[in-house]
Image: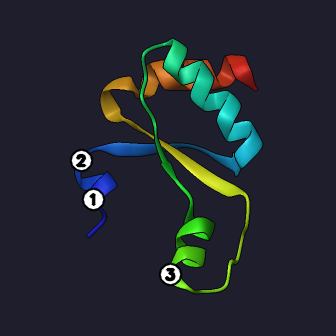
Amino acid sequence: MNKLRDQKYYLLYNGSSILILALINALKQENIIPVIKDRGESARLAGFGVISPMVQEVYIHSDELKKGKKVLEQLF
């Protein structure tokens, strides 16, 4: 069961943590609060090897998807 999918959150972008920080700031300026998923950090905290360090995913709610895509296009 994927909780993000069940709550209608959609992947907007995945990439390096540096680019993600810029995207988060741009989204927050538009009053969009993203959910950040960091599989590498989760694996590290659980004691597993890190497959892809410094790669994160940004999810936003379906209600904000159109606005979020516009922010993404303007930023990158």
Q: How many marks?
A: 3
Q: Is residue 41 above or below residue 56?
A: below
Q: Amino acid at mark 1?
A: Lys
Q: CA distance from mark 3 to mark 2?
A: 25 Å
Q: Is residue 45 above or below residue 65?
A: below
Determine crowd level at label 1: few under 14, some 14-19, many 20+ residues with C-alpha closer than 10 A: few
Q: Are marks 1 and 2 in contact (CB under 8 Å)?
A: yes
Q: Circle 3 — which element?
A: helix
Viewer-nearest of discs 3 and 2: 3
Q: Tell me which label, 3 or 1, sits earlier in the chain.
A: 1
Determine crowd level at label 2: few under 14, some 14-19, many 20+ residues with C-alpha closer than 10 A: few
Q: Circle 1 — which element?
A: helix
Pointer 2: what residue? Answer: 7
Residue 46 horizontal side relative to residue 51, left or right? left
Residue 20, how many percent across, how many down? 66, 39
Pointer 1: what residue? Answer: 3
Residue located at (55% from left, 26% from top) = 69
Residue located at (76% from left, 26% from top) = 76
Query: Which of the two residues, 60 or 39, is positioned nearer the viewer here?
Result: 39
Q: Is residue 40 above or below residue 69?
A: below
Q: What colouring does the structure picture have?
A: rainbow
Q: Tell me which label, 3 or 2, sits earlier in the chain.
A: 2
Query: Which of the two residues, 70 or 49, is positioned nearer the viewer here?
Result: 49
Q: CA distance from mark 3 to mark 1?
A: 19 Å
Q: Is residue 18 above or below residue 53?
A: above
Determine crowd level at label 3: few under 14, some 14-19, many 20+ residues with C-alpha closer than 10 A: few
